[in-house]
Image: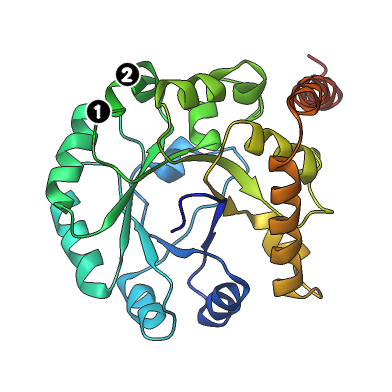
Amino acid sequence: MVINHLNLLLFTKDVSLAKQAEEAGVESIIVDWEQTGKHQRQSGYSTEINSHTTQNVIELAEVITIPITVRINPFGSNTIKEIETALDCGAKIIMLPMAKHPREVEKFLDLVHGRAETIIQIETSELVEHCHLLRDLSWNYAYIGLNDLTISRQKTWIWDLVADGTVEKIFESLGHRLIGFGGVTIISGGNPIPFINILHEMSRLNCRLSVLRRSFKREIVGRDFQTEIDAIRTAWVAASERNPKTIQDDHLAFIELLRDKKYMLYKV
């Protein structure tokens, strides 16, 4: 992936969609093996639960050249087997979800042993509390998983974690490491929060990776994939060129928008 811009990742096992994504400049395709505890944890929430397989990795590796990321299950007795299988199938990046302490992250990194790049998902209250201890570990990227972190912190809405400063504190505690959060859709999309407002906040925090979310897959239907990715890139450059006052004004307006939308949705 690229250091100095917004890296875009797409969850899919669809070979045709993956090829379109690669041609449009998406940086990585994610094959999702995470199953352990996920159905119970996310029961009642509007989240995406995938059922991807080793064969999906093999098939994708035969037709695309961008890195394939495999999200394995949370750290446990099968982690070493999952890492070895992912590498054998062609994965170039391994993503670890639901870590509860930097010690788990360190053990995971030892098992990968530099054979692939790594993404650490920050999505448990326990890991957030010890987030500063991640700073000096040798992971490549971190991604703040708003859905699971919202559940873990017993919040009402995923955007509470942005409005209350949790996301910003994580960025600050990890210094200048490559961190991401949130999801990306087409520039004119986003409901109930317009995506352009989210993009501005991502830029303010120096976000370096994000996921093309489920709404992108819906909203891209009937549109040109390349054109929409180019529009996201153009908007990202424009966001990065805002002056400090505009950045702060946009941030304050975004926080107010979140509060208004939350009240409309939950009356709280």
Left or right placement of residue 115 versus residue 129 in this view: left
Callout 1, which amino acid? Pro
Residue at 84% x, 54% y: name it.
Answer: 188
Residue extending furthest toward the bottom: 63
Q: Nearer the viewer, residue 55 or 17?
A: 17
Label 1, on which residue?
102
Residue 162 in the image: above or below residue 37: above
Q: Quadrant of residue 85?
A: bottom left
- The residue identified by callout 2 is 130
Whether residue 78 appears in this view of the structure is no
Position of residue 211 measured from the top left corner of the image (x, y, whole percent): 56, 52
Q: Is residue 252 left or right of residue 51?
A: right
Q: Residue flagged by tag 2: what amino acid is it?
A: His
Which class describes the residues within 10 Å of circle 1: few (<14), some (14-19), or many (20+)? some
Q: Name the element at disc 2.
A: loop
Q: CA distance from mark 1 to mark 2?
A: 7 Å
- The quarter of the picture where residue 84 lies is bottom left
